[in-house]
Image (spheres, grey):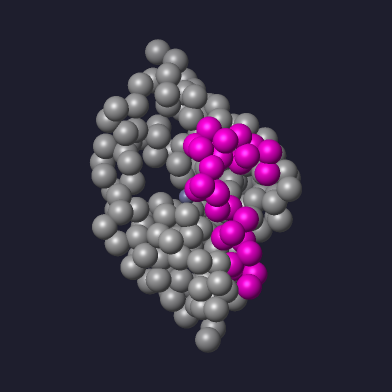
Amino acid sequence: MNNLNNLLHAASFAARCHTGQKRKGERGEPYINHPLEVANLIANVGGVHDIEILMAAILHDTVEDCGVTGEEISLMFGETVAGYVLEVTDDKSLPKMERKLLQIEHAPHLSPGAKTVKLADKISNITDITNSPPADWTIARRREYIEWGVSVVAGLRGVNEGLEAHFDSLVARARSLLES
Ligand code: ZN
């Protein structure tokens, strides 16, 4: 199979996995919008054309949110892709606060491919919190989320200038919107 076939296979698989799931923003977008946007940012803002990174971007939430295993991803899409996905997957057996702290601690130790996925993931999430926040999130909670994202991204720098610049301007805009 060529690269495009593999990419479409990953997109179709992720879409099926996320069936019925929605983003938590008030627009209630289908969940699949998020992994597709993460891959789109990596390709078209980051200028990355590494097929395994792009496939991992599309699949990055399937283990955490759909119960797919790393082994299944490895069998279907290869070990490298599965490795990236597992690197960006939180251990859901841990309490939420601990998982958030671990993301900050783990970020600098990720492989460059996983850092790229994680950086685009944070861009997509902060964009959504800025443009379509969950209805019950206060300004303080949104601010806190953005500052947590900034702390995680501090450990991801040095892999992709385009994505980092995009992240920085997004955060500047989000901060100024949440100030008033
Ligand atoms: Zn994600």
Residue 58 in view: no
Who's the residue at 26% across and 57% down the image? 20
**Percent position (x, y) of residue 159?**
70, 50
Residue in the picture at 54% in, 83% down? 2
Nearer-the-camera pick, 21 or 10: 21
Q: Position of residue 47 (x, y in %)?
A: 60, 57
The residue lying toward the viewer, choosing from 49 and 14, is 14
Q: Is residue 124 visible?
A: yes
Out of 163 and 99, give the one closest to the viewer.
Answer: 99
For residue 34: magenta?
Answer: no
In the image, residue 98 lies in the stretch drawn in magenta: yes
Tally the numbered discs: 0
Image: 16 above or below 39:
below
Q: Is residue 170 left or right of residue 46?
A: left
Residue 177 rendering spot, x and y as whole percentages: 42, 22
Q: Is residue 134 above or below residue 158?
A: above
Q: Quadrant of residue 65?
A: bottom left
Q: Is residue 51 or residue 137 the one in the foreground?
A: 137
The magenta span reads 79-106
The chief SS type of the magenta part is: helix
